């Protein structure tokens, strides 16, 4: 288990470095998400003309679709600074104070995984979001005093993979709410081509499409596939990623033609093999995979649901015909419906 944790954190570090190296810096470099880009372009333009801070913005969508990218592009466009923290790092109101007291006029405070911020911290920052002030309680009991601290006008940007877990008062305080969607294969191929150029790696157009088509609709996954194909091409070929090299690299990484990786297939194998195709609860699937429930529901399931490998029922996850097909298994006949009245009733 400890070994697994170390491997996961090393993978996490590599993924973070890769993200930072390949992340677009300006709105014009952002691929796809057209309507989101257009709306942000309009508010940026308006804020510059009105000399007002940007309104608070919430980005939501599955991991790797560009929430942090948008949050880091906006301060560049505005020529302002950004401070970054995350929901799990803010366990009590005092954890917010260094960020709030450091805000510069018009600067950005980015809170990733904002749905994991405790309610007390949420309530503490409501007045900061509304009126740019916070109430700090000093001392305890009879001697307690409340100090009202004024803050410089700033913009809060929140990112969440689970907007449903945010309280509605919190959600309502964001004037803009942008939902990010999965990317088309063409958009991902464009990202892969641009990033191959950044990495000085020759890449053919058909190889870019192959990598993109096997990237689960997600730029972060496309970057990881490109990274691996580049290493593969350097070690096993002349450094250029051709269609043949891309296919061989992805096959070796156990990414199948549908873009599903080992973990996706393991999930489907457990759902079909152990849970008889479902319905199975996410907790029992997570326990069988020895993974946290959040990893399943935030990272693995959204794509499987979107591509209809699984469906959600009130009693849990159910494998579809497509899931049986991708694993090369025969679909079991549906169990008899025991709610139907018998002939003798
Ligand atoms: P999230 O915050 O939603 O988990 P990120 O913003 O960290 O996702 O995106 C992961 C990586 O994917 C980024 O570093 C960037 O290289 C790439 N990426 C994401 N969205 C886009 C986009 N719209 N255009 C180009 N690259 C993108």
Image: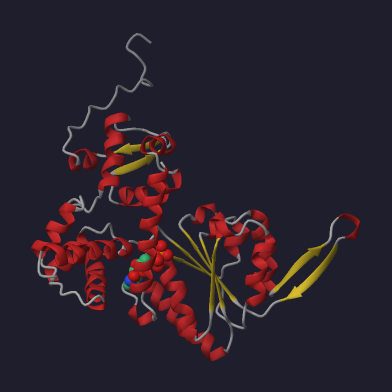
Residue 49: x and y in percent read 53, 91
Q: Is residue 33 visible?
A: no
Looking at the image, which residue is at 24% across and 50% down?
A: 260
In this view, the residue in front, 19 or 260, is 19
Q: Is residue 49 visible?
A: yes
**Does residue 22 sit above or below 317 in this rendering?**
below
Looking at the image, which residue is at 32% across and 12% down?
A: 343
Point out the residue furthest to the right here. Answer: 142
Q: How is the image coloured?
A: secondary structure
Point out the residue furthest to the top here. Answer: 344
**Does residue 99 sit above or below 78 in this rendering?**
above
Looking at the image, which residue is at 39% across and 61% down?
A: 13
Q: Quadrant of ligand 1?
A: bottom left
Q: Quadrant of residue 203?
A: bottom left
Q: Is residue 119 left or right of residue 139?
A: left
Q: Is residue 64 left or right of residue 72?
A: left
In this view, the residue in front, 194 or 98, is 98
Residue 215: x and y in percent read 25, 59
């Amino acid at each position: 288990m400890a070994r697994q944790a170390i491997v996961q954190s090393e993978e996490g570090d590599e993924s973070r470095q890769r993200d930072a190296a390949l992340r677009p810096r300006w709105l014009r470099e952002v691929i796809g998400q057209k309507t989101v880009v257009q709306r942000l372009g309009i508010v940026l333009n308006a804020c510059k003309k009105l000399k007002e801070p940007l309104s608070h913005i919430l980005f939501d969508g599955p991991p790797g679709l560009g929430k942090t990218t948008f949050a880091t592009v906006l301060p560049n466009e505005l020529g302002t600074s950004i401070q970054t923290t995350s929901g799990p790092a803010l366990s009590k109101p005092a954890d917010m104070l260094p960020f709030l007291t450091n805000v510069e006029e018009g600067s950005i405070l980015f809170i990733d995984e904002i749905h994991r911020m405790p309610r007390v911290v949420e309530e503490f920052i409501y007045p900061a979001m509304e009126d740019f002030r916070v109430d700090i309680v000093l001392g305890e009991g009879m001697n307690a005093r409340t100090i009202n601290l004024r803050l410089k006008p700033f913009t809060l940007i929140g990112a969440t993979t689970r907007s449903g877990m945010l309280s509605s008062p919190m959600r309502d305080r964001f004037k803009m709410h942008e939902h990010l969607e999965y990317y088309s294969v063409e958009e991902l191929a464009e990202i892969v081509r641009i990033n191959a150029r950044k990495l000085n790696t020759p890449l053919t157009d058909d190889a870019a499409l192959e990598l993109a088509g096997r990237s689960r609709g997600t730029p972060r996954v496309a970057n990881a596939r490109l990274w691996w194909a580049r290493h593969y091409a350097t070690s096993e070929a002349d450094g250029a990623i051709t269609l043949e090299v891309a296919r061989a690299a992805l096959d070796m990484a156990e990414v199948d033609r549908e873009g599903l990786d080992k973990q996706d297939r393991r999930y489907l194998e457990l759902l079909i093999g152990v849970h008889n195709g479902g319905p199975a609860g996410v907790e029992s699937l997570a326990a069988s995979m020895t993974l946290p429930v959040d990893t399943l529901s935030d990272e693995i399931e959204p794509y499987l649901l979107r591509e209809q490998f699984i469906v959600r029922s009130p009693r849990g996850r159910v494998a579809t015909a497509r899931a049986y097909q991708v694993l090369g298994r025969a679909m079991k006949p549906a169990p008899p419906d025991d709610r139907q009245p018998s002939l003798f009733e």
